[in-house]
Image: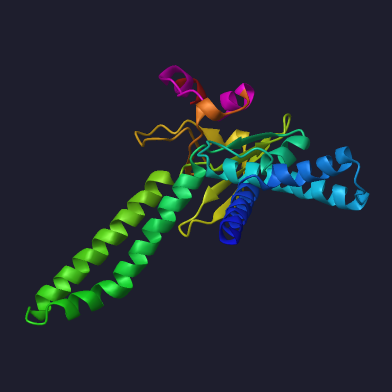
Amino acid sequence: MARRTLFHLVRSQANILKSTNFHSGGHLASYGTRSLVSGTKTDPSRVTHLAAIRKRWLSQSATSQDDNKISIGPRKGGEGGNDEKDGGVVYYGPISNTIKNVKLLSLSTCCLSVSLGPVVTFMSSTDSNVILKGAVASTVIFFSASTTAALHWFVSPYIHKLRWKPGSDSFEVEMMSWLATFMPKTIKFADIKHPDTNRPYVTFKANGNFYFVDAEHCPNKALLAKLTPQKPTHESAFKNL
C-alpha cells in the first residue's frame, strides 16, 4: 500500500513539473493570483517580481517567433524606426541580407579553393602527372574566382539602404564592397543620368557607377521619379548641341 501511494505521489509531481515547464509564464502569474484570491499572505514584491518575469518571458517568446520568420525589408522595431523619426525617407533593399549571405558564402569557397585546392589536388592522386595536377588546381581556382567576380559584378549596383530628406538635393546610399561590407556614399540628384545600357537590374547611373532601386519597395513616389530619369531622345540631344 505504501509503495502504491509513493508511486502515485511521484507520478503527480512529474505531471506538475512537466506542466510547469510548458506553461511557465501562465503559472507564474496564476500563482500570485491564486494566493491573493485564497486570502493567504503574499509579499507584494514577490507578486510584482513574478509579473515581471512573465512579461519578460512573453516578450522573449514573441521575439524568437519573429526572428524565425522570413521577412522582406527591415524588421519591426529595428533601425528603420530611428530613421523615420528624423523625418527622412528611408529605402531598404528587400533582399539585402540574402545578397550578403550569398556573397559571404562565395568568398569563403573562393578562399578555400585558393588555399586548399592545390594541396588537395597534389595530395589526392600521387601517381598523376605534375602538369596535370597543376592544370586541375588552376582550373578550380579560376572557376571559383570567376564565379565570385561574376556575382560581385551582378549585384554591385544593388542599393542596400537609401536615405533622403525631402527638399535636399542629395541622398545617402549604402553599397556593398568585395568583402561584403557596407560603404556609405552621397549622391546628388544633378549627377543622376539614364544608364543607357543593356545591363540587367540597373535603375540609374551617377558618377560613372550603376545603381539599382526596387521600384515596388520604394516608399516615396517623388523619390522614385527622381531616381528613374527618362532616356534622352534624339531631339533633346540635338538641342543640347
Q: On screen, 170 above or below 152?
A: above
82 or 212, nearer to the observer:
82
Q: How many marks?
A: 0
Q: On screen, 216 above or below 57?
A: above
Start-end of magenta stretch: 221-237
Which is the main secondary structure of the residues drawn in magenta? helix
Asked whether, in this view, residue 203 is left or right of residue 15, the answer is left
Q: Where is residue 201 shown, x and y percent of the image?
A: 41, 35
Q: Where is residue 164 shown, x and y percent of the image?
A: 68, 35
Query: From where the camera sits, is residue 207 visible?
Result: no
Does the magenta-highlighted stretch encompass residue 82? no
Q: On screen, 120 above or below 101?
A: below
Q: Residue furthest top?
A: 235
Q: How is the image coloured?
A: rainbow
Q: Quadrant of the N terminus?
A: bottom right
Q: Where is residue 190 shown, x and y percent of the image?
A: 61, 34
Q: Quadrant of residue 140?
A: bottom left
Q: Quadrant of residue 34?
A: top right
Determine the residue positioned at 50% across, 31% down.
214
Query: From where the camera sits, is residue 239 visible?
Result: yes
Determine the residue positioned at 43% across, 20% down.
233
Q: Where is residue 139 shown, x and y percent of the image?
A: 19, 65
Asked whether, in this view, residue 174 is left or right of residue 32, the answer is left
Q: On screen, 183 above or below 155?
A: below
Q: Quadrant of residue 160?
A: top right
209 or 190, nearer to the observer:
209
